[in-house]
Image (cartoon, rainbow, N blue to C red):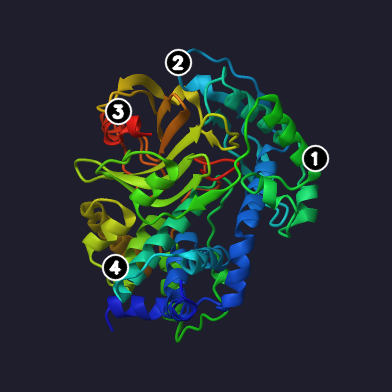
Amino acid sequence: MEQGLFLKSAVKYKDTIFRIAFNYFGNTYDAEDALQDVLLKLYTCKKEFLSEEHLRNWLIRISINVCKNTLRLPWHKKRFDMEELPETAVFNNPEEESLLSDVMRLPEKYRTVLYLYYYEEFSVKEIATFLKVKPSAITTRLLRARKLLKEAITGDNRVCYKEGGAHDISPVVRKSI
Amino acid sequence: MNDFDKYKQTFSRLHSTVAINEEDFKTMKHKHKLSKSAAIIAVAAILFAGSTVTAYATNLFGLRDLFLLKTESEAITDESTGETYETAPMTIISLQGFPDSAEYMAAAEWLNFTENYDTDGAILSVVGNDPTGFEEKYGCYLVYSQEMADKLDEIVAKYGLQLHSAMYGDFQDRESLYAQAGTGDFLGDTNYMQSNYVYEDGSIHIDGYCVLPEGNIVDFQFSNYKKGSFSDVFLNVGDFDNYSEWEYTTKSGVTVSLALGPDKGLILANLDDSFMSVNVLSGTEITFLEGEMPITSADLEIMADSFDFSAL
């Protein structure tokens, strides 16, 4: 990608990529690793983007792929720790921090859908395309996510939803195929 | 303020601390390949350290024929965090060919060597991500010491194979990839590429997805390794007993072996001048990863039909 365009695009979308990755991994370290991977793909990309929307959608799709591929690695461990929030995260009030904490306690499959729907404002159909599932599955996830979030916010049952520890599938070993 | 606004406001507080410096990415572009490989071998070394490697009986004409190595589950402690976790047992198969082929035997010998080499990662940690001097000749392989280079030379000479000398990647359209690989249109109308590379001999790797008739999308990793070249790419398939296997003749007239397990499927074909595999990243069960729809044996046959393997 041409230098000026790369820098402009990287600055513009780095937080979007970071937030998607943060929703997948739940920690800054892995999210910033993924961000670097995605930006490197952008830097080496020879594709011509037809519009700003084309670029944005491509970056989001690549971000999701990078995160999913990382999660597939057998040694990767999911973790979320509020102490691992980026140093740059400054909340205006305790409710914001509490909401983030509640969201991040949801299973990952709900977090990503919530983020793409509420923050990036994609439609259910668009999210289904990004995540390669049926739109009905996205609708279901949104409903469940809202329900779980509501329970977490209004109730006292602050459950940390189990997502598993070390993953037990390992599609790729030795060299990425 | 409604919930929607609260959510947006909260997530707007998250910012990356990564500084965007083009020089960094220029450097990363050059180092990327080695560092990625280094990371993979480092973790592989952790996964295999102290593991019990067992021989596995093979049968005829099935997934087991490709068997190379099996490791047992074991507890591993991450020294940086002190946390202990259990590794999944692995059953590694060849993607180069069946046991009577030079490609299989060479891959098995290389795997056996790397399995027992630098098991604690000490050599690799000294090498780090700096240039090793082995990039020019062994750039397509994970070689970071003279001993590894010598062993690889010995193996390819013993089995009469060639080392890959170059790879070309990120073809934006399938026609360019076909031209580089010297194939016809094998992807068909329902398979799409996400990333790809082609070696100088026409060996191909594609990460892509297939759109099934009802709209479900299934990720796959397609590989076609030319006979006569050495490949060090292997695949962990988990427990053989979890797979159902059968032979199938595709619409393009190629007989393939199909295998379907809980979290993956495989389409394999031993072609005249190459060994082809499609690692289907969905199985009969929904895995922990979102977005992966379960597939049936009929879906796997549809996928096999969607490629034209005769064009390879």
Left or right of B158 on screen, residue B4:
left
* Number of the label disc, if any, that sits on residue B297: 3
Mark 1 or 2: in front is: 1
Circle 1 chain: B
Residue lying at 61% horizontally and 27% vertically, measured from the top left: B69
Q: Amino acid at mark 1?
A: Glu
* Number of the label disc, if any, that sits on residue A117: 4
- Answer above or below: position of B2 versus A75: below
Mark 4 or 3: in front is: 3
Quadrant location, the N terminus of chain B: bottom left
Image location (x, y in percent) of residue B78: 69, 51
Image location (x, y in percent) of residue A87: 58, 79
- Answer above or below: position of A74 versus A111: above
Question: Residues at marks 1 and 3, common chain?
Answer: yes
Left or right of B66 on screen, residue A48:
left
Nearest to N terminus: mark 1 or mark 3? 1
Q: Secondary structure at mark 1?
A: helix
* Number of the label disc, if any, that sits on residue B147: 1
Label pair 1/4, CB-CB below 8 angstroms: no
Label pair 1/2, CB-CB below 8 angstroms: no
C-alpha separation, residue under disc 1 versus residue under disc 2: 36 Å
Mark 3 or 2: in front is: 2
* Residue named by callout 2: B61
- Answer above or below: position of B188 versus A107: above
Q: Amino acid at mark 2?
A: Phe
